[in-house]
Amino acid sequence: STEFRDDRRQGSLKTRGCAYQAELLFGRCVAAMSAGGSEQLLSAGRQIEEAQRRLHEATRAAADTERTAAGALTDLATQRETISRVARQAGDIQADGAGAAGGLARLSRRLKCRRAVLWV
């Protein structure tokens, strides 16, 4: 669960970082427009597109991480149920074994008594 939290935190930081970069680039774009620099404006536009692409990528990665984590949690819950069921069955087997051992001990005592009676 620690790895999941770390991955989620990193995804969240990436998303925030990309959004922050987009805001900075937007500010540069506005500055370039006011200064009349068309080359700067084109460069800022490309940088904005790249930041948007990275933001989309980070969002998709975060969604994939959440789906993977949900699947892992489902698997763990299933495994927990299986382990609990096996533990209960092992307890039942142990109780059955103890009962059988007691029954065998009684049969053995009866057999010994009968043998003793026959030898007399």
Image (spheres, rainbow, N blue to C red):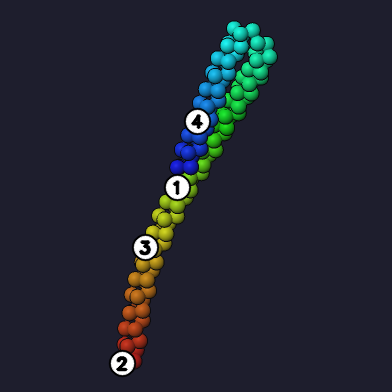
27 sits to left or right of 93? right
Give the secondary structure at mark 1. Answer: helix
The reply to whether callout 3 and callout 1 are in contact (CB within 8 Å) is no
Alpha carbon separation for disc pair 2 and 3: 38 Å
In front here: 38 or 114?
38
Q: Earlier in the sequence, mark 2 or mark 3?
A: 3
Q: Which residue is mark 2?
A: 120
Q: Which residue is mark 3?
A: 95
Q: Which residue is mark 4?
A: 13
Q: Please state the horizontal and vertical placement of residue 52, each as a whole percent of the image.
A: 60, 22
81 sits to left or right of 32? left
Alpha carbon separation for disc pair 4 and 2: 92 Å
Say few, some or many: other residues with alpha carbon within 10 Å of mark 2 (under 14 / 14 to 19 / 20 or more).
few
Report the residue at 50% width, 30% height from top.
12
Question: Which quadrant is home to the N terminus?
Answer: top left
Q: Nearer the viewer, mark 4 or mark 2?
A: 4
75 sits to left or right of 104? right
